[in-house]
Image (cartoon, rainbow, N blue to C red):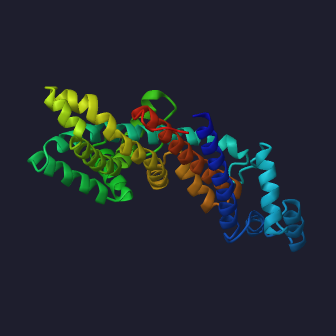
Amino acid sequence: MGAFLTRRLLEATFVLLAMSFLIYGLIALMPGDPVDLMISADPNLSAADAQRLKALYGLDRPFHERYWNWLTAALSGDLGYSRLFAVPVTDVLLPRLGNTLLLMFAALLVSFVIALPAGLLAARKPGSTADISINLLAFAGLSLPSFWMAILLILLFAVHLGWFPAGGTGDGSIGSTLQHMVLPVMALSITSIGTLLRHIRASVREALRQDYVRTARAKGLSENRILYGHVLRNAMIPVVTILALDMGTLFGGALITETIFGWLGMGKTIYDAVMGNDYNLALVGLLLATGTVLVANILADLVYGWLDPRIQYE
């Protein structure tokens, strides 16, 4: 286990380094740097002032030197300052990363709680009315764009019914935060429910065909004991993979959902940083999103061994 975990952490570190180089290069291709924006905002700055500022911030150096200087500073703990907020990027990103993780885990929990019983019901009665209805609902959830669903939820529950606020993160209290979370979580959950439901149904149906299920039935075990005591644990292995991959999907969806609902999370922050040419904030934000997905995949690998003791990590 220790060797496996060490190897996976080393692989994740290499992926983060490669991603930092790619993201840094892509951001460097964006039109206009912070000094250009300062010049456009202040006509009193001369060309000589611009050159001095670019030399001060290292913007006149070759790409590889700029990347190396950023990387060495980042490894020493200096991730730079945010141009938009005039504070260290960690002061901006860490609270908003917590907001996004809260939103994502709530959406995953809601998706799993709804998809698990629905998937089990569909798998136990294939071809039945319940199975067909559940599959239709799953396809509908997969087909709906998250941004369109978010707008519909705002129109229905915020504008017409007035049950929930249309946007924001609340005043910091638990009740206010939960109230503001309802609509974004619903928007993120709908697509995840469809994906999880179909995988749970397929995994359980496959497990029900295995020899150990026939043996358990021959011994006289009840269907519920077979399903919950034997089938479900084996069927959950591919579902855990989907849950880990959903972290990346939810991060992508969070960018749109958080922007629409005004939720102060990583998605909205990265969007604001890109639109405002805040290089440091956008770069570190994207790397944090990458790191979160990598950690989720490592945790999924560890859960495999808990679900199935036959899986070895050597």
Task: Determine which quarter of the picture holds residue 53.
Answer: bottom right
Considering depth in this image, is 190 or 44 the residue closer to the camera?
190
Is residue 55 positioned above or below 228 on the image?
below
Where is the C terminus found, in terms of image quarters?
top right
Report the number of discs: 0
Would residue 166 be seen by someone viewing this image from the given angle? no
Q: Is residue 82 left or right of residue 290?
A: right
Residue at the (38%, 37%) spot, across then down? 109
Residue at 58% from the left image edge and 51% from the top image edge: 290
> Residue 277 occupies which quadrant of the picture?
bottom right
Q: Is residue 147 above or below residue 168?
A: below
Query: Is residue 116 rendered to the left or right of residue 33?
Result: left
Q: Nearer the viewer, residue 303 or 196?
A: 303
Q: Residue at x 31, y 42 (%)?
A: 162
Residue 192 appears left or right of 47? left
- Residue 98, x across and y down, in percent: 55, 38
- Please say whether residue 5 is visible from this viewpoint: yes
Q: Position of residue 312 (x, y in %)?
A: 49, 38
Q: Is residue 142 left or right of residue 304?
A: left
Looking at the image, the residue that sits furthest to the left is 129
State the residue in front, 132 or 284.
Answer: 132
Q: Position of residue 210 (x, y in %)?
A: 24, 42
Quadrant, the N terminus? top right
Q: Position of residue 66 (x, y in %)?
A: 81, 62
Who is closer to the viewer here, 54 or 49?
54
